[in-house]
């Protein structure tokens, strides 16, 4: 159950434009790959690593300038203030699920192994994928399959699940797989199942809500000139990041001054997202869908 090789390692840490004496946060510590690279570029600076998965604690480096916080990064600002930190020089987020979590088959993230329908990144959470499958109304199920997986047959899929659970609860990954397989498009079984599991995982962990919270907090804690670096793995995440960097909002147009100039708190450093090279894609399968965006905090940007 290894952790993935850090995706876009050099590009993401370069994007932070590290000040050796600065304060940085890796909100998705995981296997510690990005954190170790950041630490290698610090002298008297500090690094805080967040991860709600207790398994990540096995990777904590023995480094005097590193502090690990075993919490969801939606609690970022409060925990930094607990440590006396009000502003930082840079924040890195490598979103999504780690290879370790997929490899830990008993946690229910993958349909390739038979396990309890769990999918909690934070094992202390109460809502699991089984909770969703067995208690959500058909309309709610259809909505998450449409919103988080863009499945055109979301309503039929939801009704099939509800009919099956009326016979007996659906509690394992393979029980769910057997129920939904009749809706699988020809020759696209793996893609379809991955979309179904993705939708459940996003809802279990409120991934988009947590990301919105992180981006909003980043504006409050980044110093002017501080960098925000985000690696996203699916279009829902990337769209939120892109819109927030461009407009300071997740939806709608940016606020403007009297003269029609945009009033935005971030300046995009990367015009287009940075994507992995073919060489990295061949070496690390997880990198294939990665998109890296970098922005800089400003007091006010007129565009």
Image (spheres, rainbow, N blue to C red):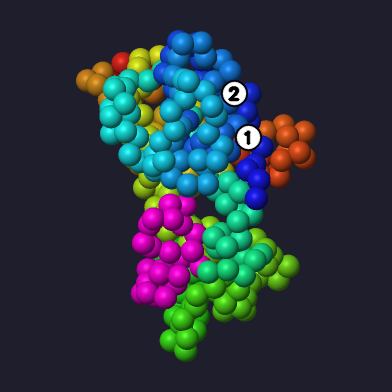
The reply to whether discs 2 and 1 touch (Cβ–Cβ < 8 Å) is: yes
Q: Which residue is drawn at 28% across and 27% down?
A: 81
Question: Is 225 part of what is drawn in magenta?
Answer: no
Give whichever of 167, 242 is nearer the camera.
167
Mark 2 highlights which residue? 37
Q: Point out the image quarter for the C terminus.
A: top left
**Measuring 77% from the left and 40% from the top, which residue is drawn there?**
282
Question: Helix or strand or loop: what does disc 1 sit on?
Answer: loop
Residue 6's disc is 1
Query: Residue at position x 67%, y 33% from top?
Result: 276
Q: Can residue 64 be seen in this view?
A: yes
Residue 45: name its quadrant.
Answer: top left
Q: Earlier in the sequence, mark 2 or mark 1?
A: 1
Real-space Cα separation, disc 2 to disc 1, in angstroms: 10 Å
Determine which quarter of the picture holds residue 187: bottom right
Residue nearer the viewer, 111 or 49: 49
Residue 231 visible within the image: no
Q: Give the range drawn in magenta.
A: 117-141
SS category of the residue bearing label 2: helix
How far from the left and from the top, in percent, is residue 203?
42, 58
Instruction: Name which residue lies at 55% across and 41% down.
Output: 58
Looking at the picture, tell me which residue is in the foreground, 7 or 253. Answer: 7
Residue 122 as seen in the image, left or right of residue 14: left
Give the crowd class for mark 2: few <14, some 14-19, many >=20 residues within 10 Å. Answer: some
Residue 27 location, x and y as percent? 45, 35
């Amino acid at each position: 159950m290894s952790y993935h090789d850090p995706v876009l390692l050099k590009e993401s840490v370069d994007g932070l434009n590290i000040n050796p004496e600065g304060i940085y946060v890796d909100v998705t510590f995981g296997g510690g790959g990005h954190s170790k690279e950041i630490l290698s570029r610090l002298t008297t600076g500090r690094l805080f690593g967040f991860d709600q998965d207790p398994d990540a604690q096995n990777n904590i480096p023995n480094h005097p300038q590193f502090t690990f916080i075993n919490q969801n990064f939606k609690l970022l600002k409060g925990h930094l203030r607990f440590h006396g930190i009000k502003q930082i020089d840079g924040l890195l987020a490598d979103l999504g699920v780690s290879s370790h979590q997929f490899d830990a088959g008993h946690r229910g993230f993958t349909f390739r192994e038979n396990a309890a329908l769990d999918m909690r990144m934070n094992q202390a959470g109460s809502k699991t994928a089984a909770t969703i499958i067995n208690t959500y109304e058909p309309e709610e199920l259809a909505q998450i399959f449409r919103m988080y997986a863009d499945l055109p047959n979301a309503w039929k899929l939801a009704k099939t699940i509800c009919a099956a659970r009326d016979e007996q609860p659906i509690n394992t990954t393979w029980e769910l797989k057997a129920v939904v397989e009749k809706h699988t498009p020809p020759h696209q079984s793996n893609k379809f199942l991955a979309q179904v599991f993705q939708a459940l995982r996003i809802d279990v962990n409120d991934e988009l809500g947590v990301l919105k919270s992180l981006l909003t907090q980043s504006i409050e804690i980044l110093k002017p000139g501080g960098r925000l670096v985000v690696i996203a793995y699916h279009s829902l995440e990337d769209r939120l990041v892109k819109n927030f960097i461009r407009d300071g909002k997740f939806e709608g147009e940016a606020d403007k001054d009297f003269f029609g100039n945009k009033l935005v708190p971030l300046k995009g450093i990367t015009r287009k997202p940075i994507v992995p090279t073919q060489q990295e894609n061949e070496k690390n399968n997880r990198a294939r869908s990665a998109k890296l965006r970098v922005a800089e905090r400003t007091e006010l940007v007129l565009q």
